[in-house]
Amino acid sequence: MIESVLVANRGEIALRVIRGARELGIRTIAVFSEADRDSPHVVQADEAVLIGPAAASRSYLDIGRILGAARAARAAAIHPGYGFLAERADFARAVADAGLVFVGPAAETIGAMGDKTEARRRMAAAGVPVVPGTTAPLASGSEAREAATAVGFPVVLKAAAGGGGKGMRVVRRLDEVAAGFEAAAREARAAFGDGSVYVERFLERPRHIEVQLFGDGFGNVVHLHERECSIQRRHQKLIEEAPSSLLTPAERREMGEAAVRAARAVNYIGAGTVEFLHQDGEFFFLEMNTRLQVEHPVTELVTGVDLVEWQFRVASGGALPMRQSEIPLRGHAIECRITSESPFEGFLPATGTVRHLAIPGGPGVRWDGGIRVGNEIGLHYDPLLGKLIAAGPDRESAIRRMRRALAELSIAGVSTGTPLLRRILDEPDFLAGRLSTAYLTEHPELFDSDLGDASRTAAVAAAVLLEHERRATVPAPRIPGDGARFSDWRAGTAPWVAPIPDGNG
Ligand code: MV4
């Protein structure tokens, strides 16, 4: 087993990786920016190295500084987490060139999957169904018109260097193709420095289902079943589940087998994910992500596998601990992403200082967080504060547990998207599993400002003000727990308000 690892990330994923490493007896080295001095990952790691100012370009995205920290701390390996440098082939190569173990696939694999047309070519050759379209970049607007006509409308123009939705243009008519091609190419050049664009048939209401993969250095590849990720907004996932509720056993098997073929085709080593679009009983390869994903805990809860542990075993030269037939699929798990965003104000990023944090617990509930009281939430990084994950024997029980856990969760000092998540967990289409990537746009009522919530908030605020006034004039009763009584109120949850004590406790 590798002796030590530098975790080139922050927030909840840095903490998750540190936890996994520590259980294996691997020495952990955190890196942090000036904005993250008090972050939990810094506290929990065995060592921590300050790598630069808050701006990610000068800290978490700076390959030189990360490698310098690894050298200084004599790290044997680097785990990239997700985001930041996780899918940069040049980073994986630089880590290997420095004589360190990169906890992830080979740089060549990352590079090949980062080029979406090359990925489509390799997948089609491996017998993985891809969305009908071109497997090479389009040379011109007129070539785009020809290709779109052959594919059939509507089509979508996508950036070859893209992924995650940037540089995407949906085109519904032939006379719009050339303009769409130019716009997509321009956007792609600006965002990725590469204006290559290809075309696919556009699926109107697909479900986004992805398969968790694992490969080792001995040619073994397995999948760990699928995740349903259709509840998203502008390519940001809000809620993920495992398994997907509407897949038939045959579809589940076919998708898993296709994902394994995809991984074999690129000699995949480590944790990866194949994303599929599923519509009308068909599924198509969309992208392959060469990292551990945000939503990996739902897979962990239905398989019992610690994916970070497997990552370290494989990176240390070990074989996969299980064969395909040994990988369980038990019960159901749901994850809610808790972000510092105001869903009722267009998901405006929220800032503030975490003043209070009540973390849910109890049966079947897991919190993967990256914040603690006193942390300042700014605008330098991703708004993900943590993830709430609930599991149960079936989807209904997982939903009931998630509702209960969302009611327990209380974060004060920074606005979060939690009220929207509570509404979704009560919404009939969600409860019935009627999901698609269009779910949120088809449920605008979830974003209505709710007088009930507002008046409840006002009532609680008035109660808090009255209590402050009372304490200013009457000696505060010295009873156990009194100090906490008014710190756990929250807006947007069940209509429940702590009774105001009468002054005698
Ligand atoms: C598509 C599509 C429909 N048809 N491709 C969005 C992000 C990027 N990874 C690919 N995306 C899509 N590609 C075809 N041919 C619909 C989407 C899409 C989507 C995909 C997954 C999850 C959420 C989504 C939301 C809107 C659009």
Image: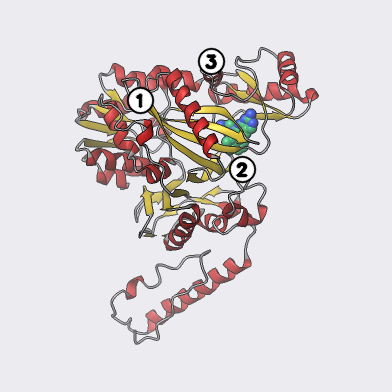
Residue 196 vertical position relative to residue 52 in the rendered view, above or below: above
Residue designated by label 1 = 63
Kind of residue at badge 1: Ile
Rendering quarter of residue 80? top left
In the rendered picture of this protein, how many numbered marks are placed on residues? 3
Q: Alpha-carbon neighbours of circle 1 within 10 Å: few (<14), some, or many (≥20)?
A: some
Q: Quadrant of ligand 1?
A: top right
Report the Cα–Cα distance between label 3 and label 2: 29 Å
Tag 3–tag 1 contact (CB < 8 Å): no
- 143 to the left or right of 434: right
- Give the residue drawn at x 41%, y 67%: 488
Residue 133 vertical position relative to residue 57 in the rendered view, above or below: above
Kind of residue at badge 2: Ser
- 176 to the left or right of 415: right
- Give the residue drawn at x 45%, y 26%: 260
Q: Is mark 2 within 8 Å of ligand 1?
A: no
Between 197 and 51, the one nearer to me in the picture: 197
x then y, percent, for residue 194: 56, 18
x then y, percent, for residue 442: 67, 48
Between 122 and 175, the one nearer to me in the picture: 122
x then y, percent, for residue 21: 25, 38
Tell me the mark number nearer the camera, choosing from 3 and 1. 3
Residue designated by label 3 = 125
Label 3 residue SS: helix
Kind of residue at badge 3: Ala
